């Protein structure tokens, strides 16, 4: 299946997302067709390298493409300026020119770091996303957000840089640890909340099949989530409008990640963020009564955490949220649901709302 992402703000940045089994085996032909280059830098992390790194480089070379592997240590805590600089320096030492391209092979951290390398290397080269986790397949590989974390917060240095192609092969999920699969489900739940009540109901009924890696359930989940994400980013590449709805759960979630030093998986932090932000939506009388409980119930059944960890104190979370890149004039803003499938806002009023700090403090201090 092919889902086209027509970037309306710059048509030459439009690209395809290919979804299908055994697509990794076809990678040389796909890359040559959609992202031709003199040489390819395959950027991955230490965990994915052990599973697919050498196999991918060998396959590209067998297909007549010049490719080299560059790797950095796995883990969100390694999504840093140091990793970006080290990878860039290694490519410079290997004399990769402006006619090269980057292939991001891995999960969300790899996609963000490799995309940032591509956005900045010699002032920008093309790249391809090859996501290997559920979260990366359905969310982070789509939309062109790249970047690294810094001590002040998550993703505070980065760039919008659209890939030339996204290759999604659900068969690689067979090697994904269960904890990572569960974490990826958080973004699927988010997509249902922000855009599709019917899809949310499917997740309520079929999350068990998806977690059991039933091919039909996985295919529907991956395809529908990608359709939702692609439709949102196509209309708003740089998050100046409706794309902000994708941040549901992320304002609190990013603060949880920063205050706990990235000891949680991203999807776990987002699940905690959605649980609290849905309660905030009800406290602000934005969300219909019962919305927060319905969201919480699905997250819980999937196996995701709902409460802030002991190390994430209320005041620390508030400070982290004030530093969040989505804050305006030091005011924390949230993308909040009115009901499952419908978000608060429009093009005139905007898609985020401010919350009184005392109300936010009370919500964070409570049990979701």
Image: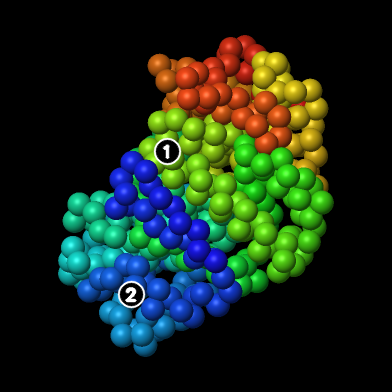
Q: Is residue 132 above or below residue 359?
A: below
Q: Quadrant of residue 235?
A: top left
* Residue 157 x/y as whole percent: 35, 40
Rendered image coloring scheme: rainbow
Q: Position of residue 343 (x, y in %)?
A: 61, 30
Q: CA distance from mark 2 to mark 1?
A: 28 Å
Residue at left 67%, top 51%?
185
Question: In the displayed structure, would residue 174 be above or below residue 243?
Answer: below
Figure quadrant of the C terminus: top right
For label 2, the crowd category at 10 Å Cα-Cα, with few meaning under 14, some 14 to 19 and many 20 or more, is some
Q: Is residue 358 visible?
A: yes
Report the front residue among 331 and 37: 37
Residue that protrudes farthest toward the bottom in the picture: 62
Q: Element under label 1?
A: loop
Mark nearer the N terminus (2 vs 1): 2
* Residue pointed to by mark 2: 32
Judged left or right of residue 95, residue 62 is right
Q: Residue at x 61, y 72 (%)?
A: 171
Q: Position of residue 30 (x, y in %)?
A: 40, 73
Instruction: Answer above or below: position of 279 versus 53.
Output: above
- Say which residue label 1 marks: 236
Residue drawn at (53%, 24%) of the image: 346
Q: Is residue 132 above or below residue 269?
A: below
* Residue 3 locus on image (x, y percent): 50, 58
């Amino acid at each position: 299946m092919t889902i086209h992402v027509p970037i309306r703000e710059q048509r030459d940045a439009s690209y395809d997302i290919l979804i299908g089994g055994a697509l990794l085996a076809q990678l040389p032909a796909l890359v040559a067709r959609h992202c031709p280059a003199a040489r390819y830098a395959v950027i991955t992390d230490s965990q994915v390298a052990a599973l697919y790194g050498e196999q991918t480089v060998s396959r590209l070379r067998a297909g007549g493409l010049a490719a080299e592997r560059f790797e950095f240590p796995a883990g969100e805590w390694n999504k840093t300026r140091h990793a970006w600089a080290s990878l860039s320096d290694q490519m410079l030492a290997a004399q990769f020119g402006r006619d090269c391209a980057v292939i991001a092979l891995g999960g969300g951290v790899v996609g963000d770091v490799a995309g940032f390398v591509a956005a900045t290397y010699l002032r920008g080269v093309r790249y391809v996303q090859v996501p290997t986790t559920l979260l990366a397949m359905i969310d982070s590989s789509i939309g062109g957000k790249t970047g690294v974390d810094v001590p002040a917060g998550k993703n505070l240095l980065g760039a919008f840089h659209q890939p030339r192609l996204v290759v999604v092969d659900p068969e690689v999920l067979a090697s994904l640890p269960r904890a990572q699969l569960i974490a990826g489900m958080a973004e699927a739940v988010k997509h249902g909340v922000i855009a599709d009540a019917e899809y949310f109901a499917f997740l309520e009924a079929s999350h068990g099949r998806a977690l059991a890696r039933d091919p039909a359930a996985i295919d529907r989940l991956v395809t529908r989530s990608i359709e939702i994400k692609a439709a949102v980013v196509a209309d708003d590449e740089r998050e100046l409008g409706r794309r902000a709805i994708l941040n549901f759960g992320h304002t609190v979630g990013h603060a949880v990640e920063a205050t706990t030093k990235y000891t949680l998986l991203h999807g776990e932090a987002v699940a905690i963020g959605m649980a609290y932000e849905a309660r905030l939506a009800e406290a602000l009388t934005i969300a219909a009564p019962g919305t927060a409980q319905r969201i919480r119930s699905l997250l819980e059944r999937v196996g995701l955490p709902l409460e802030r960890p002991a190390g994430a104190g209320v005041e620390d979370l508030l400070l982290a949220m004030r530093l969040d890149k989505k804050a305006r004039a030091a005011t924390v803003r949230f993308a909040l649901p009115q009901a499952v499938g419908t978000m608060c806002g429009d093009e005139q009023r905007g898609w985020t709302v401010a919350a009184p700090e005392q109300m936010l403090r009370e919500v964070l201090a409570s049990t979701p």
